[in-house]
């Protein structure tokens, strides 16, 4: 399965990159009622760093471990090492439209778990991606375009 989302923000490429490399910003751009609890991650993410966190969907804790890969000036990949999916890869890309307008592209490739419970949880998460990324775009714009 592949999901792709794009939006633009009035910012600079270095600011967009720095914003996305700060682990704490994941919680900032996650829509309620989902609560993100980060157990371990460096403040600023880099190549091969790992981020361990829990997504709380109401009463359900979804534990996740991802690794940061392919870090470049215009993006990076976070790859699911452990969590509700059989596989998950989220590519973050940033492209300058001009000196003050950046296009942000999120591309997720995933495969649902063969475990029936986690398949159901993953399917629910997958169908909510348009809402999740629409919120993330709005929140990212608000935080970067102050």
Image (spheres, grey):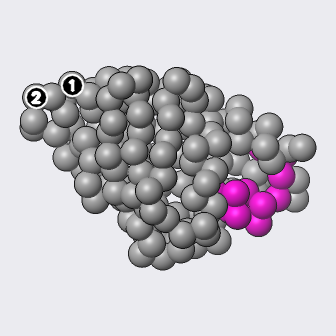
Q: Are marks 2 and 1 in contact (CB under 8 Å)?
A: yes
Determine if the magenta segment contains residue 7: no
Residue 60, by quadrant, is: top left
The image position of residue 79, as x and y in percent, is: 36, 58
Instruction: Tell me which residue sits at (32%, 23%) in the image.
Output: 124
- Of the 4 image quadrants, the one containing the N terminus is top left
Q: Which residue is mark 1?
A: 120
Residue 4 vs residue 123: left or right? right
Q: Is residue 113 visible?
A: yes
Q: Which residue is mark 2?
A: 116
Residue 129, by quadrant, is: top left
**Residue 60 against residue 27 in the figure, above or below:** above
Mark 1 element type = helix
Q: Please name the predominant secondary structure of the magenta segment in the image.
A: helix
Q: How many marks?
A: 2
Mark 2 element type = helix
* Residue 25 numbered mark, or none: none
Closer-to-camera residue (103/121) = 121
Closer-to-camera residue (104/115) = 115
Tell me the magenta residue range.
Answer: 9-20
Closer-to-camera residue (8/97) = 8
């Amino acid at each position: 399965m592949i999901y792709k989302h794009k939006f633009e923000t009035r910012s600079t490429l270095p600011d967009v990159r720095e914003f996305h490399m700060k682990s704490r910003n994941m919680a900032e751009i996650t829509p309620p009622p989902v609560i993100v609890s980060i157990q371990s991650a460096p403040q600023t993410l880099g190549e091969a760093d790992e981020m361990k966190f829990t997504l709380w969907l109401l009463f359900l804790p979804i534990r996740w471990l991802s690794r940061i890969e392919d870090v470049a000036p215009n993006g990076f990949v976070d790859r699911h090492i452990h969590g509700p999916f059989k596989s998950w890869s989220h590519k973050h890309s940033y492209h300058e439209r001009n000196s003050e307008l950046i296009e942000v592209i999120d591309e997720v490739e995933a495969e649902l778990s063969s475990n029936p419970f986690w398949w159901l949880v993953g399917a629910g998460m997958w169908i909510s991606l348009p809402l999740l990324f629409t919120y993330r775009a709005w929140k990212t714009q608000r935080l970067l375009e102050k």
